[in-house]
Amino acid sequence: MDHWTDSVESAISAVQQAMSHPGLSSEWTSILCAKLRRPSELCPDVRRVLEKNGWSRSQFRSPPVRELLLRDLRELAQSDHGPPTRIDDERRFDRQYVIEEKEKPVGEGTYGAVHRAFCNRLQKTVAIKRVKMEHEDEGMPSTAIREVAVLKAADHPNVVKLLDVACSPGRLHLVFEFVDANLKQYMKKFGLRLEPEVVRSLQKQLMKGIDYCHARRIIHRDLKPQNILVDGEDHLKIADFGMARAFNLPLPKYTHEVVTTWYRSPEILFGCEEYSLGVDVWSAGCILGEMATGAALFHGDSEIDTIFQIFRKLGTPTEADWPGLSSLPDFKPTFPQWRRRPWTEIRNIASQLGSAGVRLLDSMLRYDPACRVSAKQTLQHEYFNVDSDTMDAIMAD
Ligand code: ADP
Ligand code: MG
């Protein structure tokens, strides 16, 4: 065996041994480092693959994604021109995915266009999101790699699957399973009138997806109908989860999507910097109200307008509703005072959701994040656990 083949194969076997180690990432990473040869004994191609996966000076800056590392090494081993001169992720990418209708994206969000494409390896349609990354000449920072590893490992029927990540200078390609429509488009297709049963099923799937991610400490931060996808069989999948933070993306100056404040929780609107999982529960509550009535609950055209829209329905909050409220940076004691309106007076919410649904909505839209239900608790809620006969009786009330 020549030196090149030997070097590639021993690196592959080192990664495989690390993969079969069930322990902590720090443990298998040190096993991996010990099994890899000294830098001087590795051939330059293997070294480049390792460096691309976060290796420098005989160690990893953070645990690598073993599957990605293995895949890169295997591709190196299979390259048919003998030792290639350059490992080019972009070339691999172009060979593997055929983008359909390049000029017409299926979606345009905050960070970039999403195109439909066909994956030759998986033999299925995928969605490719291209994100421009400025000032990223040195590849992805290690914190980003760690977060991407969490997202890549996420595997739940209600979270859109991230299948592949390819990184080239200044550009990032994220490959997802393809899902027909986003929730905004889906609602439009039904004339903004969803059947109560459909609302209940979609909301339950939404809460399951959120609960799964929250259990892994992934917060979405930007849940809204455009970031929620629904397939032809009414399966709901949350998109855009943790992405902005994982890639440390600044908000682009020019975006096709107007950044909406409609689903933003009061703690974020009042400038609280330490917010948590409750922000997603608030957004999911707004989405429940919107699915039930066909229009956004708090459709303000600015932050302050959204705040006042919330006050008009839920009443201006007081220190009793939310201890600590008056010390939040953007809360003003001079805010106008509105009285709380009962849900039965707000559009057709009560007739669409039934009394159990209204109770759930109410528990999700609590001002004080500490009093808001958790995603996990909502899954035990009576709204989701009534059988359809009971549901009919509730709706007939
Ligand atoms: P951004 O981070 O730029 O907001 P999103 O991931 O929200 O990007 O995608 C923007 C739009 O592209 C979505 O609103 C949706 O219409 C479409 N889209 C996103 N992901 C998929 C997917 N996996 N399958 C089909 N369409 C998608
Ligand atoms: Mg989006």
Image: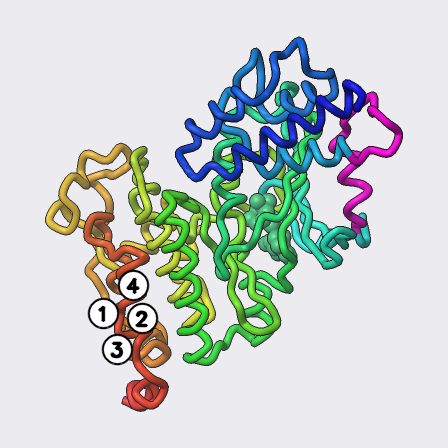
Inter-mark Cα distance, 3 to 4: 15 Å
Q: Position of residue 23 (x, y in %)?
A: 40, 36
The residue under label 2 is 346
At horizontal 79% and vertical 24% (from top left) the residue drawn is: 1
Viewer-side residue, 148 vs 373: 148
Contact between marks 2 and 1 (CB within 8 A): the answer is yes
Identify the disc placed on residue 95. Answer: none
Q: Is residue 167 left or right of residue 20?
A: right
Q: Is residue 12 left or right of residue 377?
A: right
Q: Residues within 10 Å of mark 2 (few under 14, many from 20)?
A: few
Contact between marks 3 and 4 (CB within 8 A): the answer is no
Compared to residue 55, the image places residue 198 above or below, namely below
Residue at the extreme right of the image, as rendered: 81
Can residue 249 be seen? Answer: no
Contact between marks 1 and 3 (CB within 8 A): the answer is no
Mark found first going from the N terminus, 1 or 3: 1
Q: Position of residue 54 (x, y in %)?
A: 57, 23
Q: Position of residue 79 (x, y in %)?
A: 82, 33
The residue under label 1 is 342
The residue under label 3 is 355
Q: Is residue 389 left or right of residue 28?
A: left
At horizontal 22% and vertical 57% (from top left) the residue drawn is: 315
